[in-house]
Amino acid sequence: MGVNGAYACVVRTKVASTNGGKPMKDTIFIKPGQMAIEDVDKPTIQAPDDVILHIVRTCVCGSDLWNYRGIDATAPHSQNPGHEAIATVDAVGSAITTLIPGDFVIAPFTHGCGHCAACRAGFEGGCLNHDDNFSMGAQAEYMRYQHAEWSLVKIPGQPSDYSEDMLKSLLALADVMATGYHAARVARVKTGDTVVVVGDGAVGLSGVLSAKMRGAKRIIAMSRHEDRAALAREFGATDVVAERGDAGVAKVMALTNGEGADAVLECVGSEQSVDTAVQCGRPGATVGRVGVPHNAKMDLRPLFFRNTQIAGGPASVTTYDKQVLLDAVLRGEINPGKVFTKSFKLDDIDAAYQAMDKREAIKSYVIVD
Amino acid sequence: MGVNGAYACVVRTKVASTNGGKPMKDTIFIKPGQMAIEDVDKPTIQAPDDVILHIVRTCVCGSDLWNYRGIDATAPHSQNPGHEAIATVDAVGSAITTLIPGDFVIAPFTHGCGHCAACRAGFEGGCLNHDDNFSMGAQAEYMRYQHAEWSLVKIPGQPSDYSEDMLKSLLALADVMATGYHAARVARVKTGDTVVVVGDGAVGLSGVLSAKMRGAKRIIAMSRHEDRAALAREFGATDVVAERGDAGVAKVMALTNGEGADAVLECVGSEQSVDTAVQCGRPGATVGRVGVPHNAKMDLRPLFFRNTQIAGGPASVTTYDKQVLLDAVLRGEINPGKVFTKSFKLDDIDAAYQAMDKREAIKSYVIVD
């Protein structure tokens, strides 16, 4: 889950030799339902704190599908806002002191400065020092990564040192696992809590894993797809509720002695999912929402009388990776890469989108190099 | 601030002798702009966990004014929902083990059971064991206090042991001080924080005092009334912003190096005040709102992209009184009773309402016995 839908995309033309004629493969949004690989100019350093990344692995995000499905669609023939990657550093701007060419990194979709009030508080998606806080162009051979000094997360060694399964888990730290963790963090999941997770996509499943990491005692995953429910259980779900809407809420209440959950992770973003999330919490519960909201205005009065708290937004990817997630992956304590259930080559990017669109993959993994 | 506006009021008739003919003085809402004292039947024990309270001091709440001003008005000739009192225990139901007649108590406007999931988490306004969680009828000689076993807060000694100033501070613990404290607690105000308080009524001023108690380093009170600004400073405000709306937000930003506050206490409940509160916070800030919401639906998307958190609702009066506020008052560490700037006798209840309606009093204090 990224938030790039809110950002304008670059309209790409086929390869031109304006920058010395070095072409690269890039994913182009042709029209709703059709992605293609075309040659475009390789990106170049444009600011002192830029880094050019050579992409190793990328993937397709649920939020990319809004575009693919023609909802919030960008202009025809524009660069698709892929925003998840692990990569090696190809070139660094003059202000970069933390990285050198050849370093292996996670490329978080958020680009914080690391020292403003927002970043210090662990909310770098709202970094106060620049407005262009989000990635795009990751579904390509190379991408320009702006404000890279603090934001990129160094991985020990080189890509060849890791198994494909480990690369998948490292890639999950560019967005989806950190976003699930964000839901759990802003919902203040703590030891012993009962947690409901609304949404069984890759983010929801990451939310289950995150609730488990933070010590939740009971984790109720709302899922009606058997493959996803199975992974939810593997990630720590103690109960699975297949019902949706009012029936789903009733089931959660039955499972919680009529009390509701201490915390709810809302990982969809629809009006119904937010409503379900609010109703599943006990009085004073926090709903951590990370589904990019596509709902209309909301009546906050029912929340008031139950003291329901609403938190969430773009994840703090760099913060979580550096604080807890990268170590947990490298030690083998978590395997968030299991959300990647189908693999594709970059040339087959349209098939990668299709597999997610048709729910044949929980999340599509794309091998670039 | 109470939440009784959400509850239907009892329509009273002049004294009838249905319960033995014991009359008492009660406040009656005649019509918008007119309150009167009339004789009605003295209330009786109706449930095993009832307590009949002999009111010592009561007061008028900002939320009572919605009715008085003809907004959300109740039926003509109904009992007004006064919900703040200190009192002595007149009679107890058969299930009451914590109190005996003669005890001196704070009568919180919330009536939690003390042991359900909501109460255990410190959100007794949403007590799961009964729906009638709120007081009414406190502007009278006697009131029936339902679900009293855990909820009433015992004060050492008798009313005659305390100065009038101390009685004022004890009365403030029935709602207004606890409500200000709730705003600060749900906004997670902690040591060193920069806090903005929107609203300079009795609750907003109590919010300033609460932020100070919780260790805030900088407290910016938004107030444009000199008497209230002066009390805000006495309670701990380090800065006062007189501007409202966008100009007020700009002033807060100028005072916080363009960053915004860590926490914002929203103590009004209007659409503009909520909007101001949201804009005054840094990314990831929490808005603790305790103003009963009278606003329309709200677009939550701007909150999402700044990770702004919205929390709040009815205060947890018993919890805060027992945990921290009563001790702080009895030790003289806080003087929340200073919000009562005019005193009235119960017979002059209409004048007490008028003084608040015309902003001649921050909060009107009513002497009953």
Image (cartoon, coloured by chain):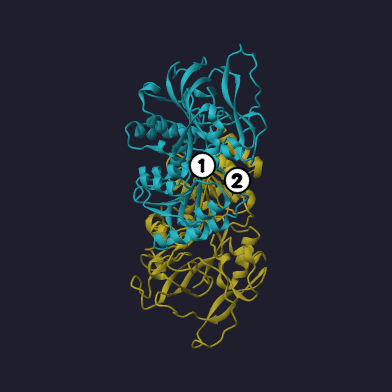
Chain colours: A cyan, B yellow
Quadrant where the N terminus of chain B is found in the figure: bottom right
The type of residue carrying mark 2 is His
Residue A86 or residue A95, whichever sits in front: A86
Q: Which residue is drawn at the image coordinates 36% and 48% (left, top)?
A: A216
Chain letter, disc 1 residue: B
How crowded is the residue under tag 1: few (<14 C-alpha within 10 Å), some, or many (20+)?
many
* Residue at mark 1 shares a chain with residue at mark 2: no
Which element type, helix, strand or loop, lies under badge 1? strand
Q: Position of residue A191 (x, y in %)?
A: 34, 48
Residue A347 or residue B333, whichever sits in front: A347
Q: Residue B231 bears which disc, if any?
A: none
The type of residue carrying mark 1 is Ala
Height in image: A49 above or below A118? above
On the picture, is B297 further left or further right than B309?
right
Q: Quadrant of residue B350?
A: bottom right
Chain letter, disc 2 residue: A
Q: Residue B285 bears which disc, if any?
A: 1
On the picture, is B127 further left or further right than B73?
left
Can you identify the residue that label 2 sits on? A294
